[in-house]
Amino acid sequence: YYPLDEMAGPTVADASRHRRDAVITGNATFYLAGPDQASFLEGTTVNRSLQLVGGSLRTRVPELNGDLTISLWCFNGLGGETREIQGWLTSLDHPQATSPSGLHLGLKSTGPETGSLILQLGDHQHTGSATLHRWQWHHVALVREGDAWQLFVDGVLDASGTGAAGLGPGDLLVIGGRSDGMDGWEGRLDEVAIFPRSLDAATIARLAARQP
């Protein structure tokens, strides 16, 4: 679990008992304002986030070779059709490459689906229907259970399908980028949580609403 409230890098602390700290590669800006829902705040303390500017976070999580859930808050700072993918949010694949068994989640930048999630499973791509607007915070969750996958935006099911079994080789997890370094996330990230199990829709909705 990465709260992303650091004041400096390059290490980003894992606040869970697993202590799988991540390392920032590339450029980042620290301690910026995060989502401002009351549930994020403790008294007058401002919730903080991390802004990536061509950088990404990398860590090793060997537990993610089966069922998994990745939950995060994102704030897209890149507008227009500057490139096909506005930015990758997370990636499971071999280091410095993409492979037919890779799993990558990002945000589409061109065509009628601009601003929607894109899930790349090996050589196949799937697109969500919800729009993640620029300069707005959104909660995103990816769930894999066996061969099935689901995408959630702001606590609501956005897309689902099959073909996810066995994808995500090795134990490299990239946050805010893709394993080959292409099209890194240009914007803020906050409250990234990784679960080595599939969470149900009700639990995803509580995460999006910041409820216990």
Image (cartoon, rainbow, N blue to C red):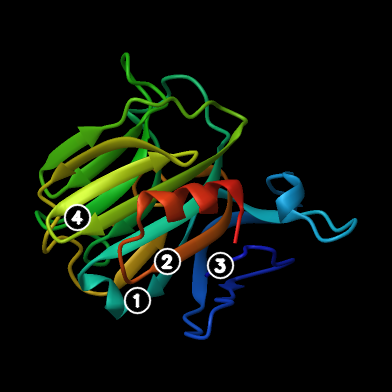
Vertically, is 90 above or below 161?
below
Distance CA(mark 2)–CA(mark 1):
9 Å
Under circle 2, the secondary element is strand
Q: Please say if the residues under marks 2 and 1 sit with CB atoms less than 8 Å apart.
A: yes
Distance CA(mark 4)–CA(mark 1):
18 Å
**Of the pair 40 and 123, the residue shown nearer to us:** 40
Give the residue type at disc 4. Answer: Thr
Q: Give the number of the mark in front: 2 or 1.
A: 2
Q: What residue is pinned by disc 3?
A: 2
Of the image marks 3 and 1, the number of the one nearer the N terminus:
3
Label disc, if present, on residue 98 of the rendered structure: 4
**Of the pair 144 and 126, the residue shown nearer to us:** 144
Q: Please say if the residues under marks 2 and 3 sit with CB atoms less than 8 Å apart.
A: no
Query: Within 10 angstroms of label 3, few (less than 14), some, or many (20 or more) residues?
Result: many
Give the residue type at disc 2. Answer: Ile
Q: What residue is pinned by disc 1?
A: 61
Give the residue type at disc 1. Answer: Val
Q: What residue is pinned by disc 2?
A: 194
Tell me which corner region of the image, top left, top right, bottom left or bottom right, holds residue 94.
bottom left
Of the image marks 4 and 2, the number of the one nearer the N terminus:
4
Q: Give the number of the mark in front: 4 or 2.
A: 2
The residue shown at (53%, 53%) is 207
**Of the pair 98 and 33, the residue shown nearer to us:** 33
Under circle 4, the secondary element is loop
Of the image marks 4 and 1, the number of the one nearer the N terminus:
1
Q: Is residue 6 left or right of residue 69?
A: right
